Amino acid sequence: MDSDSLTIESANQAIDANEHSPGNRLRYLEPAPKIDVMFDQLEYLLGHQDDECPAGCRECVRLKQVEDSLLQPFRAPRLGYAARE
């Protein structure tokens, strides 16, 4: 999902919210579902991976952190780990 469609979606949500509130009362945007935000961020970071970046690029560091967290359950135990019998 690109940023243009997110902007259009947000605007549509604001219009929908305003239809339910008469006059100039409180206006709000519905928050996006957390899973959509997470997948959008992951998609962005993975797309960024192909760009040429300077050493220590903030987005590359974020991607490494996300990869480490998501792949942690699939890593083999480290040496020195005492397996339970």
Image: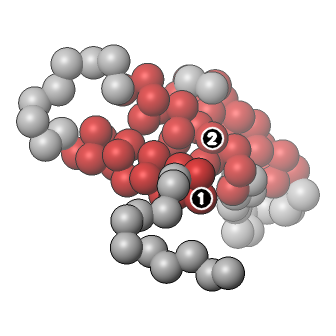
Q: Secondary structure at mark 2?
A: helix
In this view of the protein, which residue sits in the foreground, 17 or 38? Answer: 38
Q: CA distance from mark 2 to mark 1?
A: 19 Å
* Side of 30 where 60 appears, left or right: left
* Side of 60 where 24 appears, left or right: right
Q: Is residue 14 visible?
A: no
Q: Secondary structure at mark 1?
A: helix
**Disc sitting over residue 73 in the figure:** 1
Residue 4: x percent and y percent? 56, 24
Q: Amino acid at mark 1?
A: Pro
Q: Residue at x 53, y 39 (%)?
A: 42
Tell which residue pokes out farthest to the front in this image: 85
Look at mark 2 in the image and give the residue it sits on: 39
* Side of 22 where 64 appears, left or right: left
Residue 77: x percent and y percent? 49, 63
In this view of the protein, which residue sits in the foreground, 19 or 5? Answer: 5
Q: Is residue 28 above or below residue 42?
A: below
Q: Residue at x 36, y 26 (%)?
A: 48
In this view of the protein, which residue sits in the foreground, 63 or 77? Answer: 77
Q: Residue at x 58, y 37 (%)?
A: 40
Q: Residue at x 69, y 56 (%)?
A: 34
Residue 63: x percent and y percent? 38, 43
Give neighbour class at mark 1: few <14, some 14-19, many 20+ (Cα, 10 Å). few
Labels 2 & 1 near each other (Cβ < 8 A)? no
